[in-house]
Amino acid sequence: MPSPSAPSLASSDGAAYPCDRPVKRTPWILTVLTALLLTAAATASYFKAVEPDPSWSAVWVKLADVARSRSAGAILLVTVAVIALQVLRESIVVYQWRKDRVQRVLGKVVKHLLDNDVKLNRCSLFQAVRGWRAFSQLFWRMLWFQDDKGPILRELVRINPLGHYLIVYARPAGAPNDRSCACFRVYRTRPTASEGVAGRVWDSDEYSVRSASKVVEGRLRNCRSFDKYHENDPLRRFAAETNLQRASQLRARSRVASHYHGTVIAAGDGSRKWGVLLVDSFKTACPFPASVRQGDKGSMFCARFNGYAETLSTMLT
């Protein structure tokens, strides 16, 4: 039986997931482009090798003349383009293969630690990326996968292209909003300046919030600057408890969780942080209670959760 610090990636029936399982999909447009380019190269090679036939129409004679005069450069260009497309295709295949494995691990976290409920117990893997990359990925997600674009866009325009941000890399299969536009600024040399619970995890390596102040969902869209609320107002308390610094970060949400727990994903020697593994729950009862003594429910949860985080660190760093 595997120890809590080294969770198994075997399926529910005990069989390990095969590493050679094919990816679910590959970009069909790359296949089409490759076929077109190879057809063009073959056509150019054919016209270069044969003499124009008198029976050919004027159009074919013109195409043959162009191919014969420019075939060398065209074939070289097509060859380079085909190689580039194949490299891009293989890169996407590897990315999809790795993300599929990551989703399986996140699914195990929800199944074994969070009552197998991806709707009320959310598991998110955040990756730290530069601002320009965060903007490009989140702008694409906003355009194609989000309904309320206005609040999200107002957050995206604040991104510093050279800063570091945590964005959602993956969530378990079946989880809502798996292409989330959540984005939190983090720092490498300012240990208390990072944003959100994910930012606190980034700064502290491990962080929890249990039983955060309840905020009525209807107040999120009309949220004003936090300093306009009384210090005991649930909305202001929630912002302080979850390390949110701007009202716009709440206006971009449809609902907020009550409990949070996360740990950092880093290289084995601790030399480089990759991101953050964070779970948040909308349930009234906290699924990861605070640990009182060794061996209780809280300490066992943390031990197994850290084991999954270690598995992800091994896969990603």
Image (cartoon, rainbow, N blue to C red):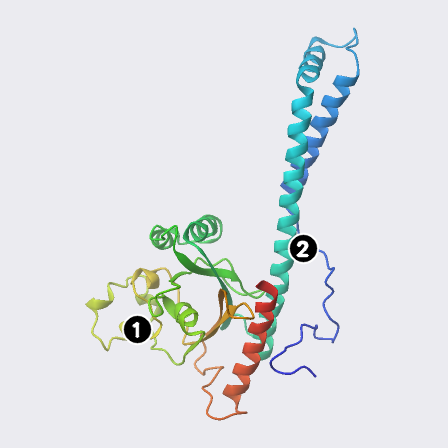
Per the image, the residue denoted by label 1 is 240
Per the image, the residue denoted by label 2 is 24
The quadrant where residue 64 appears: top right
- Quarter of the picture holding the N terminus: bottom right
Residue 153 horizontal/vertical position (percent): 37, 51
Upstream in sequence: badge 1 or badge 2: 2
Residue 187 horizontal/vertical position (percent): 38, 63
Image: 166 above or below 31: below
Instruction: Report how far apart the C-alphas of labels 1 and 2 lie in the structure.
Output: 42 Å
User: Are the two marked residues, 1 and 2, in contact with CB atoms closer than 8 angstroms?
Assistant: no
Image: 190 above or below 6: above
Residue 126 horizontal/vertical position (percent): 49, 64
From the viewer's perspective, is 225 left or right of 207? left
As shown in the figure, which amino acid type bears the numbered disc 1?
Answer: Ala
Residue drawn at (60%, 75%), measured in percent from left and top?
111
Number of the front mark, 1 or 2? 1
From the viewer's perspective, is 159 left or right of 22? left
As shown in the figure, which amino acid type bears the numbered disc 2?
Answer: Lys
Residue 169 horizontal/vertical position (percent): 52, 60
What crowding class fits label 1: few (fewer than 14 Cα within 10 Å), some (14-19), or many (20 or more)? some
Residue drawn at (36%, 72%), measured in percent from left and top?
242
Count numbered badges in the picture. 2
Asked if one can make out residue 46 in the rendered structure from this viewpoint, the answer is yes
Residue drawn at (25%, 75%), measured in percent from left and top?
233
The one nearer the camera, 162 or 283, is 162
